[in-house]
Image (cartoon, rainbow, N blue to C red):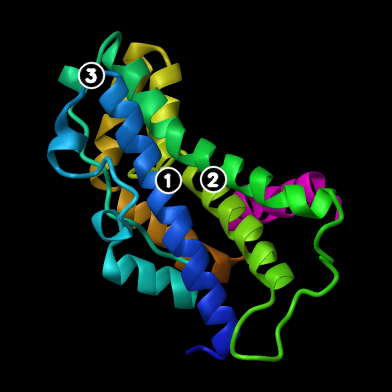
Amino acid sequence: MLGLDIATLLARAIVLLIAFTIHELAHAVTADRLGDPTPRRQGRITLNPLAHLDPIGTLMLLISGFGWAKPVMVQPAYLRGNPRTSMGIVAAAGPLSNLLMAIVAAIPLRLGLVDMSIRSSSTVFPSLSFLLFQFIFINLILLFFNLIPIPPLDGFKILTAVLPAEMAYQLRPLEQYGFMILLLAIFILPNMGIDILGWLVQTPTLQAFSLITGY
């Protein structure tokens, strides 16, 4: 599959199974705590990956680096406090969970328990160091990718939560074109020399990886 060896595919599958599940669970739990019963009614307050993974989105991310999980449905009217602010908090919970997962996975490296210089596997099964590398790196990618302020990503909801109400309202029409804008940014603009993902995702991911791991 696109030149990826079995060990890499297995490592990515393990990472995505955990990262997608906890990311979406973070959204669901936060919405639940803020008063919206929708995620609980839909069975999203669970660590069962089947409740959160989108088969096509997971496969796409596994082989191409672009994919998605099953979005958590949230009803703003149920949320306590200002609906825009509460939606922003719910949205921020997902990327924050990816950051926390990356930091926790880096602890063995900081303590010298795992040799991070071994970043590949010659067998079918990934080595622990390679698995940790993938876990940290992919979670950081998910963190910064989801913070891009383009709908339907979390970054757009966070942006509209912090902007003045009038400005946030003016941005609402973008929601119907968000997916098209995202596809344009990922697949078309790079061929024109405009690497938005490189600026907003790849560069900060590499910097954050070095910062939290020391490598």
* Whole-number angstrom distance, CA of label 3 to CA of label 1: 19 Å
Q: Residue at x 80, y 45 (%)?
A: 211
In magenta segment, residue 203: yes
Question: Does residue 132 appear to the left or right of 144 in the view shown?
Answer: right
Mark 1 is on which residue type?
His
In magenta segment, residue 213: yes
Q: Residue at x 40, y 35 (%)?
A: 156
Question: Does residue 191 appear to the left or right of 106 in the view shown?
Answer: left
Q: Which residues are magenta?
A: 194-215
Numbered label attached to residue 35: 3
In this rendering, is residue 25 above or below 35?
below
Q: Is residue 178 visible?
A: yes
Mark 3 is on which residue type?
Gly
In this rendering, is residue 157 above or below 34?
below
Numbered label attached to residue 98: 2
Asked whether the residues under the numbered discs 2 and 1 touch, taking CB atoms below 8 Å apart as contact, a structural biologist would say yes
Q: Residue at x 49, y 68 (%)?
A: 14
Q: Which residue is mark 1?
A: 23
How many numbered dots are placed on residues in this image?
3
Q: Assess disc 2: are there few (<14), some (14-19) or many (≥20) residues with their C-alpha within 10 Å of its C-alpha.
A: many
Q: Residue furthest left?
A: 41
Mark 3 or mark 1: which comes first in sequence?
1
Secondary structure under tag 1 reads: helix
User: Residue 50 at what x, y percent from top left?
Assistant: 26, 61
Question: Does residue 189 appear to the left or right of 39 in the view shown?
Answer: right
Secondary structure under tag 2 reads: helix
Asked whether the residues under the numbered discs 2 and 3 touch, taking CB atoms below 8 Å apart as contact, a structural biologist would say no
User: Residue 141 at what x, y percent from top left?
Assistant: 58, 54
User: Residue 75 at what x, y percent from top left?
Assistant: 17, 28
Closer to us: 4 or 106 = 106
